């Protein structure tokens, strides 16, 4: 089961159903089932170790093909996304054809270096 919750959900008017508002009622059951990976840090904060996040990395940063910018994004976002439970490294949406192969390879390799869970 894959749930797709994007950062764009916060921009919707409060009277409209958003992916976030539609999934929030399901989150406790999803967490209890042990099969959930969500892409929303608000839900991560609320349900902690019961859920994992997927994605959340801005592909536009990769499109710059600037390794310093890619690393800055990884260092900024990975600790919070990983805290308490699992995280799957992924950009939002798809990887753009504007991203050089070497930039994407750096993103994955550096992301694994920074984001590997280690025993304390």
Image (tube, helix red, strand yellow):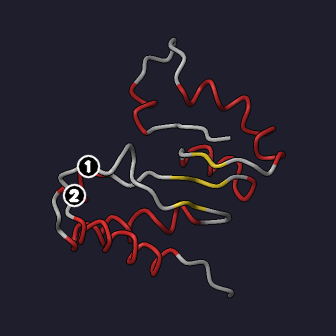
Residue 55 drawn at (x, y percent): 47, 52
**Residue plotted at (43% across, 62% down):** 77
Between 15 and 118, the residue placed more toward the observer is 118
| Residue at left offset 21%, top offset 73% | 68
Q: Secondary structure at mark 2?
A: loop
Q: Is residue 113 above or below residue 61?
A: below
38 sits to left or right of 47: left
Q: Which residue lies under the disc numbered 2?
A: 99
Quadrant hosting residue 57: bottom left
Q: In this rendering, is residue 109 above or below 99?
A: below
Considering depth in this image, is 41 or 115 the residue closer to the camera? 115
- Indicate left or right for 17 with 51 as reference: left
Q: Is residue 22 left or right of residue 106?
A: right
Q: Which mark is residue 119?
A: none
Question: Which residue is at a point 39% across and 53% down the rendered structure image?
Answer: 91
Element assignment for label 1: loop
* x, y percent for residue 48: 69, 55
Residue extending farthest top: 15
Q: Nearer the viewer, residue 89 or 24?
A: 89
Residue on which disc 1 sits = 96
Task: Judge whether 80 appears above or below 18 on screen.
Answer: below
Q: Are marks 2 and 1 in contact (CB under 8 Å)?
A: yes
Q: Is residue 119 left or right of residue 42?
A: right
Disc tally is: 2
Whole-angstrom CA distance, mark 2 to mark 1, is 6 Å
Q: Which percent across, then down, holds residue 88?
A: 55, 60
The C terminus sits in image quarter: bottom right
């Amino acid at each position: 089961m894959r749930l797709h919750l994007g950062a764009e959900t916060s921009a919707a008017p409060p009277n409209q159903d958003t992916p976030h508002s539609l999934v929030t009622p399901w989150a406790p059951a999803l967490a209890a089932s042990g099969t959930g990976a969500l892409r929303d840090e608000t839900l991560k904060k609320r349900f902690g170790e019961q859920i994992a996040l997927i994605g959340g990395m801005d592909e536009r940063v990769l499109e710059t093909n600037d390794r310093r910018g890619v690393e800055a994004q990884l260092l900024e976002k990975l600790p919070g996304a990983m805290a308490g439970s699992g995280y799957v490294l992924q950009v939002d949406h798809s990887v753009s054809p504007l991203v050089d192969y070497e930039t994407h390879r750096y993103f994955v390799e550096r992301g694994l270096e920074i984001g590997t869970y280690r025993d304390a």
